[in-house]
Image (cartoon, helix red, strand yellow):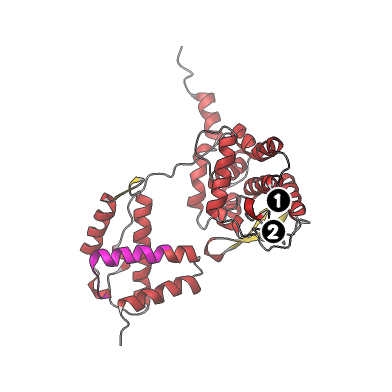
Amino acid sequence: MTANLKDLKTQFLEYMEIEKGRSVKTVENYDRYISRFLNFGKVQAPGAITESMVREFRIQLNRSHGVAGTMKKNTQNYHLIALRAFLKFLRKRDVISLNPERIELAKTSPRDLDLITSDELNRLMTAPTKASATAGKSGNSELMYLRDTAILELLFSTGLRVSELCNLNQDLDLSRDEFSVRGKGDKVRVVFLSASAKKAVSEYIKKRGDFGEALFVGYGKAKKGKDLSRLTPRSVERIVKSHAIKAGITRKVSPHTIRHSFATDLLQNGADLRSVQALLGHANISTTQIYTHVTDKHLHDVHRAFHGKRRG
């Protein structure tokens, strides 16, 4: 007897988590996207999914408005990617439904990079130290600023994603200049510590003096340092944004901005694209190539050397 649609979706989500190694957050997103489609089409059985239904769903997504305005093409595609993965799963289980190859993704414009200048980056990196000098050493303020400096230095030294940073534990081996991190798709890669990052993390851990598991934790004022809950990606985003404001940076700055700075810094100083791809943990080099248009010194030199020479 064929499983019903609800059971098939549950099996698919479990498959994505266990067999495919997707993160809990990714599985939650897939659940939300697929449920939105099934509810939209009032789908009762896999065989009821049609091309016209998918097309109407795409039109509905494209015309939908939220707090941030019209839904972005990338977000629309996330829905289609999840649906396509579900249909591929059904096909592997010999369940009759729409051919997943019939679903094409919407064309998207080239990704914009949230870049900051070298001067802005330097101001950001020193913002916690300057804030600490102003605040003094009362309560947990000194420890918090040491933590924040360690976060910023580690992000720039390694190019970690914010989720990867939050998953780090305090047992990090600082006797070495490298450590392994488990990233997207459960893939492991090696990242490297600069001298300044190693020093910042070491000073933070030494000042903590506790045996909590997480490397970066929150400090509630009312709890006087006893709140050792692991920082969430949203918490780190708020910390980075706060120090960017203190540093006088008017544009939007996030942990991913520092990841962009890590990549462009390497490329501008001569690193090859394949190496940067490996350091960032990108599955496809096409993802890394978004940085090349802002780092190609050769093209800039060619333009400067040969352009406009016949003009008076």
Mark 1 closeness class: few <14, some 14–19, many ≥20 residues within 10 Å:
many
Mark 2 closeness class: few <14, some 14–19, many ≥20 residues within 10 Å:
some
- Quarter of the figure with residue 94: bottom left
The label shown at residue 29 is: none
Q: Residue furthest top?
A: 312
Whether residue 228 is visible to the viewer of this picture, yes or no, is: yes
C-beta proximity under 8 Å, tags 2 and 1: yes
Which range is magenta?
Answer: 29-45
Classify mark 1: helix, strand or loop: loop
* Relative image position of residue 284 (x, y in whole percent): 50, 56
Quadrant that contains the N terminus: bottom left
Helix, strand or loop for the magenta stretch, by majority: helix
Q: Is residue 92 above or below residue 219?
A: below
What residue sits right under mark 1 in the picture? Answer: 193
Q: From mark 2 to mark 1, how far is it between C-alphas?
A: 8 Å
Classify mark 2: helix, strand or loop: strand
Q: Amino acid at mark 2?
A: Phe
Residue at left 51%, top 69%? 21
Q: Residue furthest front?
A: 222
What residue sits right under mark 2 in the picture? Answer: 179
Q: Is residue 33 magenta?
A: yes
* Relative image position of residue 63 (x, y in whole percent): 26, 50
Q: Amino acid at mark 1?
A: Leu
Q: Is residue 97 above or below residue 164?
A: below
Residue at left 59%, top 42%? 267
- Quarter of the figure with residue 136: top right
Q: Is residue 10 magenta?
A: no
